Image (cartoon, rainbow, N blue to C red):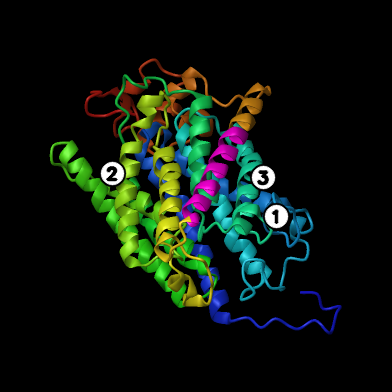
Amino acid sequence: MDTSNPSQPTPVYSSGDITWVMISTGLVFLMIPGVGYFYSGMARSKNALSLIILSCLSVAVVLVQWFIWGYSLTFSRTGSWFIGNLNHAFLINVLGDPSVGSPKIPDLAFMIYQCMFASIAPALAIGAAAERARILPTILFIFIWSTLVYDPIAYWTWSPDGWSMKLGSLDFAGGTPVHISSGVAALAYAIKVGKREGHGVEDFKAHNMSNVVLGTAFLWFGWFGFNGGSALAGSLRAVMAIVVTNIAAAAGALTWVLIDYFRTGRKFSALAFCSGAVAGLVAITPGSGFVGPAASVLFGVVAGIGCNYARHLGHLLNFDDALDVFAVHAVGGIIGNILTGIFAEQRIAALDGTSIAGGWLNGNFMQILIQLAGSVAGFAWTFVVTYLILWIMDKVPGLSLRADSASERLGLDLSELGESAYQHMDCIFANTTSVPAVVETTACDASNEKILVDRNTEKI
């Protein structure tokens, strides 16, 4: 806050609102290792640790980027219709003034809360290239991508000067900046880095469903802060956002489970439940502050159906999205944006005094077209810029995106980290000077000696 001008009124903040935003910051932070565990369990065991650590690295890299210029580019008080400026680079003058997001909370609280959103977006995206993307180039990619993709889209969507905000787009908690951008970036990454060795031949199954369930629990719990915290106040609107988030997640989980139950011989799949819950959470994100409980059921059901069938796009379009990031986040985000244009209600936004024209339910058919415009712009910008970033990086010596064949066979845990999530992998590395030809059929006994195991019962 500028204290040099005594005539400037002193802001009066609510300690309760600030506390809720700080709690929400912690909840969204918890989602990021949740993404790591979710992805880790879905991958093969030899790549489990790399996916967890990449999610954690995403926080570290984006925190530095956010401090240097990310926050300023995204939420500077003055800027063009496209991007902010560097007036708050290195967090200059980011302290106690009322924030751009809301006069109810100070700038510093808003800054760290929004940093968690910026951190989770690349963590989601990198899952598409799991099991074959090198870690060093991925770290650099996260920094560049956050600057050139996430920051502009978040500025369009949430800054008062952004073109999408001025157009009247409704995106309460990040349908386009977080989910469409990460899902489309995942598509570009999967296409550029190529398919995993054995894709279409080997059966790549989730190796640890406990990790998947744990990651889902972290994500679902953290989403209370993701959507509820976006009210930036401990208001009735925040409560409604949490309520509809829960309902949409439950509806998405049940829908996906039932689809797979009849498709796969009447089995209640844990992976189906987790995937459906995340799809419902993604879809409700843009509309969570604008829709009521009845509409949220439809968000979950439509996302459960749409994202489930979108998984088959990889086979139709011949790309290898290892963890279905595009199907769940890009498709789920688009579904959420469109449904928000239909079901957004003036009375829900008014729970904290916000005034909107509403969606089709309130007679505002144009809102659907506005939502489509934001979705298409976010999709196009993300894919083109992400692919260009990856293409240029792949041409730079030392920044080749893909691990070599031997490293991929060994697994990124050992080849890139020199560590692994499981003891039986460590012993292979300790007893081997090069990538063993039988690494996929090797394990360890209790004395740390290598033994052969049946590939039908254990796959490293």
- In this view of the protein, which residue sits in the foreground, 211 or 158? 158
Residue 378 among magenta residues: yes
Residue tagged 2? 271
Q: Report the Cα–Cα distance between label 3 and label 1.
A: 12 Å
Nearest the viewer among 178 and 139 is 178
- Tally of numbered discs: 3
Quarter of the figure with the N terminus? bottom right
Q: Which amino acid does label 2 sit on?
A: Leu
Q: Nearer the viewer, mark 2 or mark 3?
A: 3
Which of the two discs, 1 and 2, labels the residue nearer the N terminus? 1
Q: Is mark 3 on a helix, strand or loop?
A: helix
Tell me if label 1 and label 2 are in contact, CB under 8 Å. no
Left or right of residue 75, residue 259 in this image = left
The x and y percentages for residue 354 are: 54, 73
Task: Inspect the magenta stretch and tell me whether residue 362 lies in it.
Answer: no
Magenta range is: 366-386
Residue 67: mark: 1
Residue at figure coordinates x 57%, y 27% from the top left:
401
Q: How crowded is mark 1: few (under 14 residues within 10 Å), some or many (20 or more)?
A: some
